[in-house]
Image: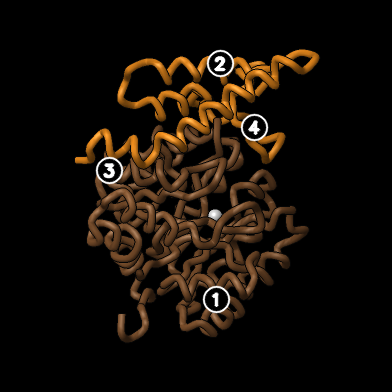
Amino acid sequence: MRYIEPHAHMVSRTTDDYQAMAMAGCQAVCEPAFWAGFDRSSAKGFYDYFSQLTQHEPRRASMFGMPHYTWLCINPKESEDLALADEVLAIIPEFMDSPNVLGIGEIGLNKNSRNEMAVLEKHVDLAARREQLILVHTPHLEDKRKGTRLILDVLKGDSRIRPERCIIDHVEEHTVKMVLDDGFWAGMTLYPETKCTANRAIDILEVYGNERIWMNSACDWGISVPLAVPRAAQEMKHRGNDHRFVDKVVYQNPIEFMSQSPRFILPEGH
Amino acid sequence: MANRKNILDLYFLDARARLIDIAAFMDRVDRADGETDFRHDAFREALKALDSGMANRAEKVLLSFSDPTDEPIPAATTKAACGAWPGADNA
Ligand SMILES: [Zn+2]
């Protein structure tokens, strides 16, 4: 089996996880910027984090022959503090020329507040000015439907943004249709409790098809499974899905989306 | 298109176990002391979607737990979500 992990927070994972992913067939790993689990005290904390994402993690991944790509932003969970958000937005361009940066992400909303909306709009503006791809985090649980609607309205309200260059992540049964209908890409996150199980993600693929959609583990410092994508691919085969259907979801689709950035290159032999 | 019997062969035991878990959870809540809250009300409301005969039960369950409003809130007072909408007065 071959697959790409399009959303993993590897700074929070062990080197054993990199090894297990490589052994399971992972061909590339992509890491959006995330909340640390606690609020960073200043923009300097983000400077160090962005350095880690652009310099240190690619080296860890390369030990197992995997290219590592990343996305930069201040997370919506830290967007209530507008002054801090502005400071972080000001240092992002310094890192945007790093060879593993694919775009701006994971931006979006958490509790759907006015300040989160303001910071989302600033990130969208930065992505538009620098012609970057966008990776969007949609809110959790009871906040997801409303937040997804608000995010789509922001993106559609900016005439510079092309939906096929944006992936709206963490979709579930109640949000996937609005995302795909508006021409965006959709990501399904495989979490045991709070997002999609493998079986529900496969149901969504069977109902809505396998165009403009991918699956990810979104593994981070919380309860999450770094091998969730190959496990789901295994379940797809168990259910009788054709291997070409599976390969498109877990390998070809991530390549199709991320190759819109000239920086996304798989190593020779793939 | 999958065959219904195949789906039952693959997933009946798993779904049966989850259904019993839900029943046991409801019994557990009933046995305990004190008041429930909006999460319990939302859970009972969501159960109605299961026996609705509609094709989109999972979507209906998710929507019944969702914030139905459309305007951004003035400010985030927490980072966490609890899984059910507390209502406009408690949000
Ligand atoms: Zn994430």
Which chain is tinted orange? B
- Amino acid under disc 1: Gln
Chain to which mark 3 belongs = A
- In the rendered image of the structure, the colour used to display chain A is brown
Q: Between A142 and A5, which is closer to the camera in this rendering? A: A5
Same chain for labels 3 and 2? Say yes or no. Answer: no
- The CA span between labels 1 and 4 is 34 Å
Q: Please tell me which residue is depicted at 61% across the width and 58% down the height of the picture.
A: A220
- Amino acid under disc 4: Cys
Task: Bin the neighbour count of mark 4 within 10 Å (Cα to Cα): few under 14, some 14-19, many 20 and up.
Answer: few
Which image quadrant shows ligand 1?
bottom right
Q: Is residue A42 above or below residue A267?
A: above
Q: Position of residue A74 (x, y in %)?
A: 60, 56
Q: Earlier in the sequence, mark 4 or mark 2?
A: 2
Chain to which mark 2 belongs = B
Q: Which residue is mark 3?
A: A206
Disc 3 secondary structure class:
helix
- Amino acid under disc 2: Arg
Q: Quadrant of residue B49?
A: top left
Q: Which numbered disc covers residue A19?
A: 1
Residue B14 visible in the current orientation: yes
- The CA span between labels 3 and 2 is 29 Å
Marks 4, 2: nearer the viewer: 2
Quick check: is the Cβ at mark 4 less than 8 Å away from ligand 1? no
Task: Bin the neighbour count of mark 2 within 10 Å (Cα to Cα): few under 14, some 14-19, many 20 and up.
Answer: few
